Each structure stands twice: as C-alpha cells, then as structure tokens.
Image: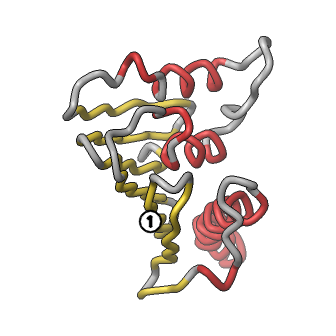
C-alpha cells in the first residue's frame, strides 16, 4: 500500500520533468531558437531563458512545474501571430498540434485557428482556449504578446 501511494506522489513530478524537458529540447533543436542548456537559469522552482528572434521579437520563456509562460516584446506591432514564440511553443506542447499536412488533426486545426492573424485584429485582445486538456491564455497588446500554457485542472 505504501508503495502505491509513493508512486502516486511521484507521478506529478514526472509530468513536471517532462514539461521542462519537452520545452527545453524543442528550443534547443529548433532552428528558430537554438537555445543551449546553459542559456537557461533557475530561480527558485522556475526555469527561465531570454532571447531575441527574428530581429523583432525579444522573448522570455519560463517553466514552472507543468506551466509554461511566454512573454514577447516586439519592436513594431506584431504582424505574424503564427510565427510568434507563443504559437510555436504551444504547438510543441499540445499533443499532435504541430502537423503541417492537409490531414491535420483536430488539435492542429484548433491551434492554427487560435494563432490565425485574422482572429487577432484588435490592438488589445485576450483569448482563453482549451485544446485536448491544455488551457492557453493569450494576451495581445500593440507591442507585446504573452501566453500561459498549462494543463486543465481536474
């Protein structure tokens, strides 16, 4: 009985490690980011990295447990939501959301719809969606885009 309880206590820890490892590995191998393991630093229980991409987007990514937050600041108003840090990282976290072919899954279609430029026409906009058990909260301002990606609480 004690062994079973111990296993249930360890399951959340394995999910936390998987989230951190998934995001860090994606950002390491992605041609868009190429973030080295040494580019991450830890503050309390949160892993953080900061980088500039596309010569236009300054991005900060934080991983705390099973929650990922991305905050981007742009030198000019964002014109391509689909290529933003929030969009690319959410596609990696949401299961089966990053497919590019015409036989896209429901998750791919939902994530593509979320980050479609035509759905983000206002200067100030907030959206909350749930895709396959993952909640994405996104906030757009003229020169900023922030999002939090986390599992839906049961």
Q: Residue at x 53, y 36 (%)?
A: 133
In this view, the residue in front, 150 or 69, is: 69
Image location of residue 145, percent across then percent down: 35, 46
Q: Position of residue 120 (x, y in %)?
A: 34, 25
The 10 Å Cα crowd at callout 1, few under 14, some 14 to 19, many 20 or more, is: some
Residue holding disc 1 = 60
Q: Residue at x 28, y 47 (%)?
A: 143
Relative depth, front residue between 36 and 69: 36
* Quarter assignment of residue 117: top left
Look at the numbered disc 1 and give the secondary structure of its residue: strand
Residue 13: horizontal and vertical position, in percent? 61, 71
Say which residue appears at 79% left-offset and 13% top-offset: 103
Total marks shown come to 1
Tell me what residue is drawn at x 38 percent, y 48 percent: 147
Horizontal side, residue 47 vs residue 104: left or right: left
Q: Does residue 25 appear left or right of residue 90 in this picture?
A: right
Picture quarter with the N terminus: bottom right
* Front residue (pair 146, 108): 146
């Amino acid at each position: 009985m004690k062994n079973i309880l111990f296993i249930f206590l360890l399951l959340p820890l394995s999910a936390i490690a998987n989230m951190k490892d998934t995001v860090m590995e994606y950002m390491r191998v992605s041609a868009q980011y190429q973030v080295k393991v040494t580019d991450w630093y830890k503050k309390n229980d949160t892993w953080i990295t900061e980088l500039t991409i596309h010569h236009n987007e300054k991005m900060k990514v934080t991983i705390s447990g099973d929650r990922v937050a991305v905050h981007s600041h742009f030198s000019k108003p964002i014109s391509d939501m689909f290529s933003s840090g929030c969009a690319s990282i959410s596609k990696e976290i949401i299961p089966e959301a990053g497919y590019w072919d015409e036989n896209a899954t429901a998750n791919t279609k939902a994530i593509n719809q979320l980050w479609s430029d035509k759905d983000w026409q206002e200067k100030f906009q907030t959206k909350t969606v749930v895709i396959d058990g993952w909640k994405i909260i996104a906030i757009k301002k003229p020169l900023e885009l922030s999002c939090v990606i986390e599992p839906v609480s049961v």
